[in-house]
Image: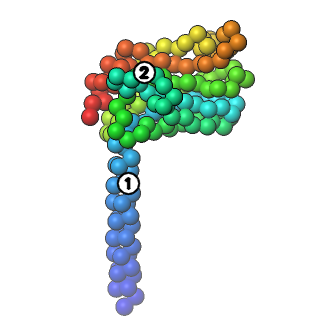
Amino acid sequence: MKAKFLSFLTISLTLILGSCQNSFKTETQKQKDNYSIEIEGLFQKNDKLEVYYLIEGKDWSNENSISQAIYGSNKMQKIVLDLPQDVTPKNLRIDLGVNPSQSYVTIKNIVIKFKDKSLDGGNEIFLDWFTPNEFVTWDMNYYGYKLSSVNGSYDPYLLGNDLLMDKMANELKQ
């Protein structure tokens, strides 16, 4: 009798857990219908990371941006920014922060995902995709980016170049 009850209980739990996993997979798949940008980096001070996305026929604007607060840490962090549904970016610009006391940032990887496809910028491949502006310079001693003010202004960012735009258009097609 105990053996039948235990068998029934085991089968019931297996069915319940299996249906929960299927539900989780369905929810996860729905979340992949929009573009997302994963940035793995070291930000030692509290700051705000912002990603601007360029849409065909539009100019760069605050309206087409998303941001994420970053809490300072001496450990690598993975920051995920999800673009709105039904947005197909032509190009990306990654603003590395607004805190002028954030003098160094290390970026280990940038991954751009859409549905089941991704552009993985690991092993410094992302360096070929983005061009830093005048507020961002490579520091060999720190082995990362030095962020600095120029003429009293502070706006460090990495702008996607033609190679990134080609990769997004060809490798992340809908």
Q: What percent of the width, then of the height, locates residue 29?
A: 34, 49
Residue type at tag 1: Glu
Q: Which residue is mark 2?
A: 59
Return the residue nearer the eye: 56 or 149. Answer: 56
Residue neighbourhood size for the residue with mark 1, other residues' Cα within 10 Å, grouped as few (<14), some (14–19), many (≥20): few
Picture residue at 55% right of the left edge, 30% below the top: 50
Quadrant for residue 173, please give it.
top left
Question: Quick one: SS at disc 2?
Answer: loop
Residue 36 shows in this picture? yes
Nearest to the observer: residue 7 or residue 103: 103
Identify which residue, 138 or 162, lies in the foreground. Answer: 162
The disc placed on residue 134 is: none
Q: Residue at x 61, y 19 (%)?
A: 155
Q: Position of residue 15 (x, y in %)?
A: 33, 70
Look at the image and tell me in which quarter the N terminus lies: bottom left
Q: Residue at x 61, y 13 (%)?
A: 135
- Residue 167 vs residue 145: left or right? left
Res. 168 image quadrant:
top left
Question: Residue furthest toward the right?
Answer: 101
Indicate the secondary structure of the residue bearing disc 1: helix
Residue labelled with disc 1: 27
Q: Pick whichever of labels 2 and 1 is earlier in the sequence.
A: 1
